[in-house]
Image (tube, rainbow, N blue to C red):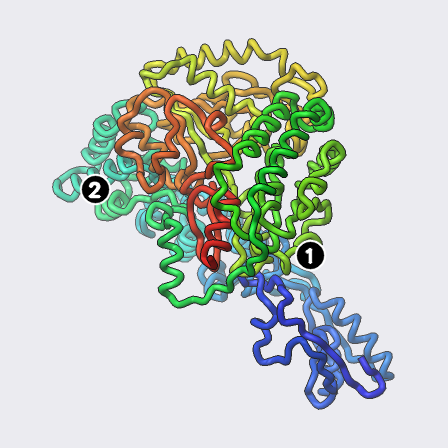
Amino acid sequence: MDVNNGEITYYIPSDEIVNKPGHEYGVELQELYPEEVLDKEQTVSVFNGKAKLQWKADWSMRLLYRNIHFEMHGEDLTDSASVARQIFATLHKPVPLLYKYGLFLDASGKKISKSKGNGFSLDDAKNLLTHEAIQTHLSKDPKKSTKFYIEQTPRLNDQVNISNKNKKRLSFFKISRILQASKPTNISSARKFLDLYQKHGETISENELIISYNYYLKTNKHNNHGLTTTREKDYFSFIAESIKQEETLSKEDIYKLILSSFTKYFPERDSSQIWTLLYRGLFGDICGPRIETWIKINDTKYIIEHFTKPQTLTSENKETHNEIKTTESSMKINKDKGNEIKMTKLLSKIDFNQIKEKCDALSLQLKENRNALIDALSGYQCKIVTEDEIYRSVDILENIDKNKEYFNHHIYGVTSFLPLNQPIYATVCFGFIPSLMAENVCIRPPTAMHLHYKKFENVIDLSKISSSLSISYENKELFLSKRVNVTDAVIFTGTPENAIKVRKHFRKNTLFILNGAGHNPLVISKDADINTAIESAKRVVLYNQGQDCAGPNAILVHNDIYDSFRDNLITRLKDIEDKVGAYSDHNNIVGPNSDIDHCIKIASIFKINRDYCTYGGEINPITGMIKPTIFEKPLSMGGNYKEFFAPVFFLQKYQQDQNLDDYFSNPSYPANAMYISLFGTSNYISNELNKKLHLPESILNNTDLHLEEHGYLPYGGQGPAASCLWYDGNRINGSTLPQRDIYRYLVKPQL
């Protein structure tokens, strides 16, 4: 800045990448400023409208320029008002009177804003408040911020009545509660429901009814507890058609039809489960009014409408069934659109003999330093886990020949975000192997792992074997800022939500490889070998105390062998109770959670499922210990799709093979579809399961993912939250293998 001449000299680097709000990917400055001169210094005058001040200073100067002596401003602009006073004082100008007024706030105390969508419209005020309530609420001290949100309206209306000494038993608040519980289909049925609660001499005016019903319509939300299976939808459809065909059916007959049809459609379910099903389908909730009363009060045409168009479970991933794209078709679509892909610059050709030498060198280091590695990570994981990591790492290094075709040319940069578990194996797969095909590879361990990872580094210095590999312990934002301009491919392990946040920093043509979280259920059919199934269940659930994306969210067990499976599982868990404890005891096979704070999250999930806990359930938030736990919840009561990341066996009994559809057709399943371990046989799994969602290689027969996974094989499923790639704006669902994916998308197209 040249203060004397009023000039500013600036420079815009064309290839600098910025994370612009609202953009899905990082954007180069040349895209943001296509009309600007780039990569060259520019000097401009700040006078005559050629420059704009920052907001706070700009507001002040506008007041000065327009000779304004009085200005009102919201409480949120207090700092701007302070800056304005300082500017006026500095310029020796009389300071205008700046009057601060309070804000309208939402339920959480945040400013009401149109852009945030948390506002309270004039129509809302007119439809939900009495005239007296509006006047009373708006006549308060204007300097004081006031909460003003939809859920507040019944009490605001009641406050007026109380102040007028007209307190009523059936207040606006109580009426709103009654309507929320009753689920009326129209204002007429709302009146009938309220009549049931009125005492002799009590009245509810038409205005009170209209306002209360408007409030019910505004706040009655589908709580995402709708129907989940085809059978449930067929049941509702049958009832709707039956009522239509039998026009003379009385309300009593309709009620009997609903009960008898449930037994026909769900013979394996307990009769008491009908109510939850009806609440889910009719109201999208798990509670509601007495169904007999609801049928009696509402008109038949509205009853038919509710059964014809029941509430269904919504999911943003529901389209997964129809949007699974293969790699080839995704790339074909992209080319047909005529979009130009900025290709990665290929560097030197790879000498595979050197690759072999480096892999052999690291393999030897891992085997020779086995005990030192166990000691280095003894504060982070059990001995058995470190031994397994060494075995898996050696396995991929000694079988790198199986991936020879992928090592063709070097690219420049790969950035890798390691998972919270398996530091050695993840480093080999997502750091060391990519460093053999790139000039600049940097991996960042998660913060909770830093202390222990440094101990691992002290045992094996990976950079001495592969000079292109480096480790970063920097703050994530700083790390990202340094990597965006040098990265051709990103390898990210974590939740899809965090992946999206990271992906926004990188260019659209950066290959982004996501390893997320899968459901990986175990299915134990009636002809399964129980001993084999139990050993697999123990292996995948207890490994690394359940901190593994291969862990199953549910273990589906056929009714015929359920009791035997559960009893034997409990017996074997009791046999290893003396092997649950601190990592320092090398005999232990289950230790504390690597992230101690995870215990707090798990405690809330345990609380929700406390009624189903039949073994274990102990959590120590001080040490991070979560002991092996069994929950038993029949599949007919809903499948479990929550990932525990803890040693939890979530057993779900199913009656018949076809009942498995209740689990796999649920909208909560496809987004995380990964592998299925099938013990015994199942016609449903073999012949009726969605073939696009589960390719043949994702069905593991009489074995489990822990035994079948190898670092030289693709890993993952067709669920986009389980694993996928992003490249040039396309999401490609499916398994991932970094060396294959880098070759396929960044190298092969240029050969």
Taking the spot 63% from the left edge, 52% from the top edge, the residue there is: 439
Taking the spot 44% from the left edge, 14% from the top edge, the residue there is: 566
For this view, does 186 lie left or right of residue 114?
Answer: left
> SS at mark 1?
helix
Q: Position of residue 214 (x, y in %)?
A: 41, 55
For this view, does 663 lie left or right of residue 237?
Answer: right
Q: Position of residue 41 (x, y in %)?
A: 72, 79
Residue 103 visible, this orientation: yes
The amino acid type of the residue labelled 1 equals: Lys
Rendered position, 42 above or below 406: below
Q: Which mark is residue 240?
A: 2
Q: Is the C-beta separation of discs 1 and 2 under 8 Å?
A: no
Q: Position of residue 513 (x, y in %)?
A: 52, 48
Q: Which residue is mark 1?
A: 482
Q: Position of residue 288 (x, y in %)?
A: 38, 37
Labels 1 and 2: the sequence-earlier one: 2
The amino acid type of the residue labelled 2 equals: Ala
Q: CA distance from mark 1 to mark 2?
A: 61 Å
Q: Residues within 10 Å of mark 2 (few under 14, many from 20)?
A: many
> SS at mark 2?
helix
Taking the spot 71% from the left edge, 25% from the top edge, the residue there is: 378
For this view, does 474 lie left or right of residue 648?
Answer: right
